[in-house]
Image (spheres, rainbow, N blue to C red):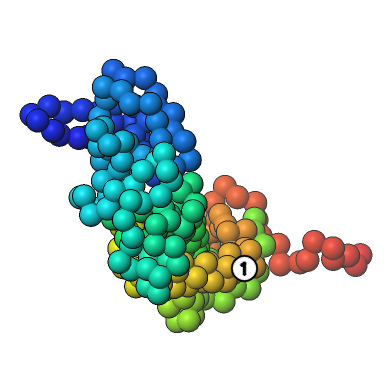
Amino acid sequence: MVWSVAMGTTTLLATDLQRTVLRSGHTLYRRYTPYGGFRPDDGAWLGFSDAHLDHASGCYLLGNGHRAFSPALMRFGSPDRLSPFARGGLNAYAYCLGDPINHRDPTGQEAADYLFPILSILSNLAGAFTSGLRLRSMWRTRHMHQATGSYPASRGGVMTYGTVESHTSPPSSVDWALTGISGVSAVAGITLGISRTVEPGEDWQTWALATLTVISLGTSVKEVWSLAQARSWERYPITPVRIEPNRAGSASPRSSAPRLSLEPANAIRQS
């Protein structure tokens, strides 16, 4: 949804991912041809891919009037100054490289791919979620290896019952660094992807977004593998039993829990 202010009035616009106006005000839904042609109505002058439509000529004035594009002819009315050896492409009159479904050209100078930023945003969101799960797992594992009162266990000198403990190693500096890199690259990729989708920029943004996405996906695969291998949550909850000497000089558990047995479960007593 986009708000458009013009001539002192405010109009609510319903748009799609390409920012093409589907409905404005009280007008019915618009139907476009692949190159942006539609039946003129009394709605907003913004049309296909958020471009200004000149009702007199039936052309879109891209780049604030830089070039006029005719949806009926499916081509520009003037050649691209960046063609044929620059970013304009080989055909100086082509619109969106002949593929207006997967590209958009708001400036009239070069086609911009809008699907790649959206896919990058989704990939980086998944990477950020994975980094959050991995960070939570490492944080809990770190506390498990600290002999503090908040996390009593047998490592702190307190006897326990009702649990089977397995050996778990604390997270290393490499694990913390990997999770930090994954989280930072995911957040940066999401920010750059949103900026690239809203307003297409320079080529360095595309390369930077691709690099951040690859880093986020690569580190996320390693984190998912680490999460699948680590099962530290199976060791909890651990119920501590406080041992205090009684009057007879023997030790008894100060708890309603069953007494601890030092004999293995499968031991056979000799009569």
x, y percent for residue 72: 41, 39
Residue extending furthest toward the left: 8
Say what amino acid the circle numbered 1 marks.
Answer: Trp
Q: Quadrant of residue 40?
A: top left
Q: Quadrant of residue 199?
A: bottom left
29 versus 192 height, above or below = above
Residue 50 in view: no
Badge 1, how many Cα within 10 Å: few under 14, some, many 20+? few
69 versus 56 height, above or below = below
Q: Is residue 124 left or right of residue 251?
A: left
Q: Is residue 32 left or right of residue 164?
A: left
Is 53 in front, or is 249?
Answer: 53
Q: Quadrant of the N terminus?
A: top left
1 versus 137 height, above or below = above
Residue under label 1: 225
Q: Residue at x 33, y 68 (%)?
A: 82
Q: Residue at x 49, y 53 (%)?
A: 98
Q: Quadrant of the C terminus?
A: bottom right
Is 156 in front, or is 214?
Answer: 214
15 versus 43 height, above or below = below
Residue 6 in view: yes
x, y percent for residue 110: 36, 61
Residue extending furthest toward the bottom: 173
Q: Residue at x 62, y 58 (%)?
A: 234
Is 49 in front, or is 220?
Answer: 49
Residue extending furthest toward the right: 271
- Secondary structure of the residue carrying tag 1 is helix
x, y percent for residue 96: 43, 54
Q: Residue at x 67, y 62 (%)?
A: 164
Q: Is residue 191 left or right of residue 100?
A: left
x, y percent for residue 192: 33, 62
